[in-house]
Amino acid sequence: MDSLTIRTPDDFHAHFRDGAMLSNVAVFTARQFGRAIVMPNLVPPIITTEQALAYKSRISVALPDSLQFKPLMTSYLTEDSDPADIERGFADGVLTACKLYPAGATTNSAQGVRNIERVYGALATMERIGMPLLIHGEVTDPDIDIFDREAVFLDRVLSRIISAFPALKVVLEHVTTSDAVEFVESSGPNLAATITPHHLVINRNAMFQGGLRPHFYCLPIAKRERHRLAVRRAATSGSSKFFLGTDSAPHRVGDKESACGCAGVFNAPFALESYAKTFEEENALHHLENFASVNGATFYDLPLNEGTITLERSGSEVPLTYGTGVDTVIPFHAGETLAWRLKPRE
Ligand code: DOR
Ligand code: ZN
């Protein structure tokens, strides 16, 4: 097969940032995807509908109209979030979902949730109106090993949320363990999960290959090989409970290559090519369209995109860097040649 045409895909988890970074990175997502769920963990975070609306227009300004890309906005849940504002934002079509960050779990999550019961009012509203809850599923207790934080979250937090709000739609974001895969598979239809390109490709050794490799450091952190294989099986299985969410998370090179480097993999420029590589290696290219373009939209109750995109087997050379000076960012697969290449959208 030398060419693969699929319905235009969506990215159900992307970090666009703000300011100069937004102007530099959003176009990579908008070139490949019809829509993207935009994460709200800015500084300060996007908490209210009004802030989401203002951020949405900054994103539109950063993108050429010709791309016909639709950002889907999210609000960052805090213990002070106002359920009435969330309900209005959803009803007005400004907000698509809310994001739950346990406080301290990841980048800019300090204002996140410490006690899950403090957001039960918001969750009850979201359950009633059919608004999805997106979860960064890691506990933050310092006594829990970083490689166990996702698995422990399933038992301690996620099961409680699901039993308290059985009709709430929940997306467990960026799953990295066989525990999470099995949890999602064995739960009802209101729980689904996104999977990133990088967690399909790297295991935890990648961070330490011949030295410390900060560009493979992200959260949840990459796990053992057996977990990567479980995540690959889930993504490529054809199950409608798993869908595409890149978690593309750019940081300036100086913020990554630092004594206390930021978490995040910038995979937006060649995200589809990376997923295509994994699906081809698993003999599952026939499942790529559902994973990338159907399962997520169906779970979110969004119409499927109308257009198509085409991947050709003509090779993509991934640049070593994007941007210049302090704004340089290093992409996932830097310096590699990937077999597939996305034909530019007409
Ligand atoms: O690696 C990550 N980077 N994980 C997250 O959850 C957040 C993200 C970021 O915003 O940089
Ligand atoms: Zn993220």
Image: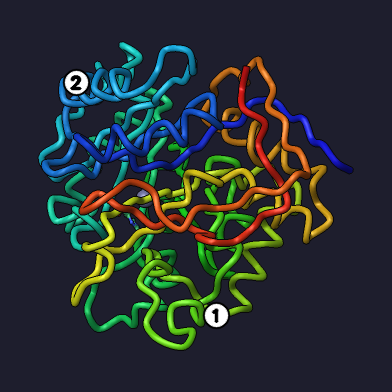
Q: Which residue, given by chain and number where applicable, does mark 2 sit on?
A: 54
Q: In the image, which disc is placed on residue 75? A: none
Residue 181 appears in view: no
Q: Residue at the spot x=55%, y=70% of the render?
A: 202
Assign a secondary structure to mark 1.
Answer: loop
Residue 261, above or below 322: below
Task: Residue at the far front: name it.
Answer: 325
Assign a secondary structure to mark 2.
Answer: helix
Measured Cα–Cα span from mark 1 to mark 2:
41 Å
Question: Would residue 138 be found to the left or right of residue 48 on screen?
Answer: right
- Residue 112 horizontal/vertical position (percent): 18, 51
**The quarter of the displayed image where residue 254 is located:** bottom left
Upstream in sequence: badge 1 or badge 2: 2
Residue 240, above or below 147: above
Going by the numbered disc 1, the residue's amino acid type is Arg
The quadrant of the rendered image in which ligand 1 is seen is: bottom left
**The quarter of the displayed image where residue 129 is located:** top left
Q: Which residue, given by chain and number where applicable, does mark 1 sit on?
A: 224
- Residue 274 horizontal/vertical position (percent): 62, 52
Going by the numbered disc 2, the residue's amino acid type is Ala
| 198, 146: nearer the viewer | 198
